Amino acid sequence: MKIKLISALFVLSLSPYIFGQVNPCDEFNSLNTKVRDGLISRVDAQNQILQLLPKIKEYFSQNGGTEITDKNWVFPLKGYTSASIGGVNGSGYQPKDYDYFDGNKHGGHPAHDIFIHDRNQDDVDDNTGKPVDVLSVSNGVVIACEPDWDAASGLRGGKYIYIYDPSYEGIFYYAHNSKIFVKTGDVVKAGDKIAECGRTGLNAYKKRSPTHLHLMFLQVEDGYPKPKNIYNELLNAKTK
């Protein structure tokens, strides 16, 4: 009788895997947190990404996700255009010294900062008197997010979201949000509201930093997320 009871308990402990109840997006979120905090080697992390992405693709498809091309991408800030991208002709994109596996201590700036009208830095658009919606650029699934942040935190991205796009086998990273409206495992479409633009994050919170969205795209190659410049695609993205 004891043997049967122990066997039953063992099966129950594994039941999420047996019955397919474990969300691969939650697994990626846990992995990403370990990478962020330097708690896993790059070899182990890369191997886990290789194992998880096929499962995430299947999850995306099974939950109504559809693939689109960059011709249907949407500019990530509602009411704004590519004219709000920092730098000159996308010069703010500086990928040198960046490595995803360096986590919160990475170098470089392989992203585009998109600035909003917010002189008093209250996370509200000066012209509309309302927060600025952050929109999903493409169709995808939320594979990691951090909805909590405080000023004492050393987290550079603040309240962030990672969305995997199976069409391009890449990951969109949206950082410094004031509020997040999605959770891990949510399947989203281009133009869906996922957050509101804000000032969270170690440097973004400081007065010297204008309010902006930090947008990065990582092309995944053999389990290795590498930065790719999507400036030209943002120039042609649809606006809302």
Image (cartoon, helix red, strand yellow):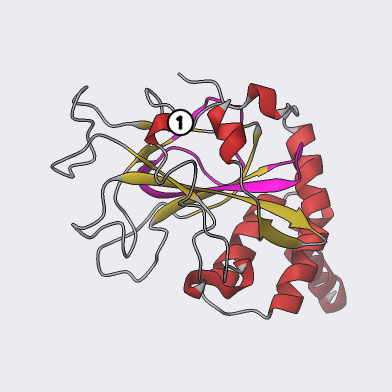
199 left or right, relative to 138: left
| Residue 191 drawn at (x, y percent) | 53, 25
Question: Residue flagged by tag 1: what amino acid is it?
Answer: Ser
Vertical side of 59 occupied by 20: above or below: below
Residues rendered magenta in the picture: 165-194
| Neighbourhood count class around disc 1 (C-alpha, 10 Å): few under 14, some 14–19, many 20 upward | many
Answer with the quarter of the image where residue 130 lies.
Answer: top left
Visible residue check, residue 20: no
199 left or right, relative to 32: left
Answer with the quarter of the image where residue 100 lies.
Answer: bottom right
Q: Residue at x 83, y 55 (%)?
A: 18
Q: Residue at x 41, y 51 (%)?
A: 147
Q: Residue furthest front?
A: 88
Answer with the quarter of the image where residue 9 lies.
Answer: bottom right
Q: Quadrant of the C terminus?
A: top left
Q: Residue furthest left?
A: 120
| Element under disc 1 | helix
Q: Quadrant of the N terminus?
A: bottom right
Front-most of 161 and 94? 94
| Residue 90 drawn at (x, y percent) | 49, 44
Residue under circle 1? 82
61 left or right, relative to 128: right
Visible residue check, residue 108: yes
Front-most of 171 and 111? 111
| Residue 28 drawn at (x, y percent) | 66, 58
Vertical side of 69 occupied by 154: above or below: below
Residue 192 among magenta residues: yes
